[in-house]
C-alpha cells in the first residue's frame, strides 16, 4: 500500500493530462501521473496531425513522444497503473486506488479520456485481436496488401481509411448514412482515393471467420437499405476497424455522482467538478464544443492553475 502524500494526482497521460502535469510541476506541486495504457493517449492512434500550432504536419505518435519527453524533462512521477476507484476522506484527502496500490492526494485531475465504442454485433468479441481491431495505426501493417474494412462516418473513420489506403490492397469504408460528418477537404480526399471503396447506407450485422485450424476474420455480413428495401451481402475481408464513436472512460467515478446522463464529467469554467479539489479535463468532460488536441492542452493548463489556487486556499 502506497501512502506517499501528493499535492496532485493526475489520472490519464494524454495531451490534457500531460499538460496539466507540466504546469503543476512548474508550480512546484508534488505530482503523480497515472496512465493505464499508452502515454500520449490517442495521439498514438492518430496517423497525422495537421492542425496543431507549430507543426504543419506531424505524425500522431511523434507528437505524443514530444509531449512525453517534455514531461520527463521535469522528472514527473509517472506510473503505468489503472485507477479503479476514487474516494474522498473526511480529512479532505483523496484516496486513489489502483489494482495494486493506494495513493493519497490533496487534489485530483481526471484526464482519463475516452475508449472506443463497439459495433455490438455477433462475432465482434470473438474476433477481436483476430482481425477486428480498434486501432488502424497499431495493427494496419499486419494486413498489408490485403482487403480491409473501416466502419464509421466521422473523422476517425475517414482518417483510418486514408491511412490504410497506403498499406492495404483495398479499403472498404462502410457508413450507415449517405453523408459523412467531416470537413470537405477530408471527404474529398476519401472520395478521390482509388483504393477506398465507399459502401453507404449499410451496417455490419455479422462478423465471421475460421475458428478451427486458425482463428481469423474472413468475412462480414452487411445490411443495405435502398429504396426502402433491406438486402444482405457478404464481403470477404481480412480485417475490420470499427470507428463508430467514443465513450467517456469514467466507470471508476460513478459513485461520486459527478457525471451526466452519458457519463461525461460535468465541470465549470475552471475545469472543477462539484467536489472541491476534484477537477477534470480533455475528452472526458462536458460541456465542451470540440474535442481537439489544442483544447485538451488548454484544459490541462486551466485545471493545473485551478489546483494551485485550491491548494493555496485550503493551506491558509
Image (cartoon, rainbow, N blue to C red):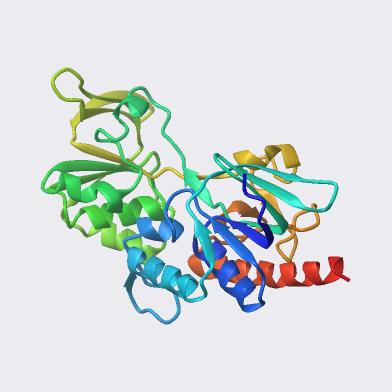
Q: Which quadrant would the C terminus be assigned to in this image?
A: bottom right
In the rendered image of this protein, does residue 72 appear above or below residue 110?
below
In the displayed orientation, state which residue is furthest to the bottom: 54
Tell me where residue 132 appears, x and y as whole percent.
29, 36
Residue at x 41%, y 33% (from the top left corner): 119
Q: Does 310 appear above or below 97?
A: below
Query: x%, y% of residue 194?
Result: 16, 55
Q: Which quadrant of the view contains residue 249? A: top right
Query: Residue 165 or 283: which is nearer the viewer?
Result: 283
Residue 109 appears left or right of 47: right
Q: Quadrant of residue 259?
A: top right
Identified at 43% across, 28% down, the residue is 120
Q: Indicate left or right for 259 with 300 as reference.
A: right
> Is residue 226 among the parts visible in the rendering?
no
Of the pair 288 and 81, the residue shown nearer to us: 81
Q: Position of residue 240 (x, y in %)?
A: 27, 38
On the rendered structure, is 55 left or right of 191?
Answer: right
Q: For the image shown, how many numbered marks are present on the structure?
A: 0
Quarter of the N terminus within the rendering: top right
Picture layout, residue 55 above or below residue 307: below
Query: Image quadrant of residue 312?
Result: bottom right
Q: Which residue appears at 26% of the width and 47% of the height?
A: 139
Q: Residue at x 61, y 39 (%)?
A: 251
Q: Is residue 247 above or below residue 159?
A: above
Residue situated in front as seen by the camera: 41 or 151: 41
Amino acid at each position: 500500500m502506497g501512502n506517499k502524500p501528493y499535492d496532485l494526482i493526475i489520472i490519464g497521460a494524454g495531451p490534457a493530462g500531460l499538460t496539466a502535469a507540466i504546469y503543476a510541476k512548474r508550480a512546484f506541486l508534488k505530482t503523480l501521473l497515472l496512465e493505464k495504457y499508452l502515454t500520449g493517449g490517442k495521439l498514438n492512434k492518430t496517423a497525422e496531425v495537421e492542425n496543431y500550432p507549430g507543426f504543419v504536419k506531424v505524425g500522431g505518435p511523434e507528437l505524443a513522444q514530444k509531449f512525453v519527453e517534455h514531461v520527463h524533462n521535469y522528472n514527473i512521477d509517472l506510473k503505468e497503473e489503472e485507477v479503479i476507484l476514487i474516494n474522498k476522506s473526511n480529512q479532505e484527502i483523496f484516496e486513489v486506488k489502483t489494482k495494486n496500490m493506494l495513493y493519497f492526494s490533496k487534489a485530483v485531475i481526471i484526464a482519463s479520456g475516452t475508449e472506443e465504442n463497439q459495433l455490438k454485433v455477433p462475432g465482434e468479441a470473438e474476433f477481436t485481436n483476430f482481425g477486428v481491431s480498434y486501432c488502424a495505426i497499431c495493427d494496419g501493417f499486419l494486413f498489408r496488401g490485403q482487403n480491409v474494412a473501416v466502419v464509421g462516418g466521422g473523422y476517425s473513420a475517414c482518417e483510418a481509411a486514408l491511412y490504410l489506403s497506403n498499406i492495404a490492397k483495398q479499403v472498404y469504408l462502410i457508413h450507415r448514412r449517405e453523408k459523412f460528418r467531416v470537413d470537405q477537404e477530408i471527404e474529398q480526399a476519401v472520395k478521390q482515393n482509388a483504393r477506398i471503396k465507399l459502401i453507404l447506407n449499410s451496417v455490419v450485422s455479422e462478423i465471421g471467420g475460421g475458428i478451427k485450424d486458425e482463428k481469423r476474420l474472413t468475412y462480414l455480413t452487411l445490411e443495405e437499405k435502398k429504396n426502402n428495401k433491406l438486402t444482405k451481402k457478404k464481403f470477404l475481408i481480412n480485417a475490420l476497424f470499427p470507428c463508430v464513436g467514443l465513450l467517456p472512460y469514467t466507470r471508476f467515478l460513478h459513485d461520486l455522482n459527478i457525471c451526466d446522463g452519458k457519463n461525461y464529467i460535468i465541470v465549470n469554467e475552471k475545469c472543477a467538478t462539484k467536489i472541491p479539489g476534484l477537477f477534470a479535463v480533455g475528452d472526458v468532460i462536458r460541456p465542451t464544443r470540440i474535442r481537439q488536441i489544442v483544447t485538451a492542452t488548454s484544459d490541462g493548463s486551466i485545471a493545473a492553475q485551478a489546483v494551485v489556487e485550491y491548494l493555496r486556499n485550503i493551506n491558509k
